[in-house]
Amino acid sequence: MIQVLLVDDSRVTREVTKLYLVQRKDVTVQEARSGEEALKSIRAHRPDVVLADMQMPHLDGTGLCAAMKADPALSDIPVVILTSVQDPRARAQCLAAGAREILAKPVEPEHLNEALHRALGERFPLGVPKR
């Protein structure tokens, strides 16, 4: 099973994104409402990939990504940033912090699957049967 940590301060965004993810038979999803909560969960459960909102109070997605990349125990976990921000400088900061990819909100299921395939390779094959 592929373990995904979904980090967003919006309950609605978490619920919608989780609905896309759990349609696959090979995915389990944990949720966090903040960057701080996410770091605790990542250290405790070590997910295969993190999907994080760019804009959250206190520790945002860019900060979460930077904290993970600075920690040798977490630096190999891929991070995909989800955002409605169109500012190229903010997006560049996410990539500079170590994000693998940035997806625009609202996230399209096919784009999410493709991004996870790029982040995880053959561990997340495209075309896996749905539940």
Image (tube, rainbow, N blue to C red):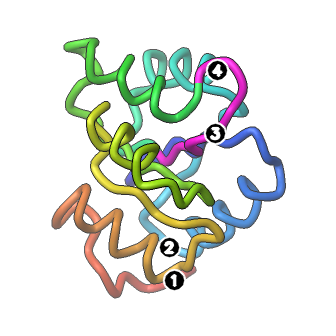
Residue, disc 2: 24
Q: CA distance from mark 2 to mark 4?
A: 25 Å
> Residue 19: x, y in percent?
68, 68
Which numbered mark, 3 or 4, is in the foreground of this view?
Answer: 3
Circle 4 — which element? helix
Q: Residue at x 50, y 73 (%)?
A: 24
Dot 3 amino acid type: Gln
Label 3 CA crowd tier, 10 Å (few <14, some 14–19, many 20+): many
Q: Earlier in the sequence, mark 4 or mark 1?
A: 4
Which numbered mark, 2 or 4, is in the foreground of this view?
Answer: 4
Q: Are marks 2 and 1 in contact (CB under 8 Å)?
A: yes
Q: Are marks 3 and 4 in contact (CB under 8 Å)?
A: no
Dot 4 amino acid type: Glu
Residue 35 part of the magenta segment: no
> Residue 126: x, y in percent?
30, 81
Q: CA distance from mark 3 to mark 2?
A: 27 Å
The relative height of residue 13 versus residue 23 in the rendered view (above or below) is above
| Residue 19 seen anywhere in this rendered image of the structure | yes
Circle 2 — which element? loop
Magenta stretch? 51-59
Residue, disc 4: 37
**Between 79 and 21, which is closer to the camera in this rendering?**
79
Residue, disc 3: 55
Q: Earlier in the sequence, mark 3 or mark 2?
A: 2
Q: Earlier in the sequence, mark 2 or mark 4?
A: 2
Residue, disc 1: 130
Circle 3 — which element? loop
The relative height of residue 99 versus residue 129 in the rendered view (above or below) is above
Q: Main SS type for the magenta part?
A: loop
Q: How many marks?
A: 4
**Between 67 and 127, which is closer to the camera in this rendering?**
67
Which numbered mark, 1 or 3, is in the foreground of this view?
Answer: 3
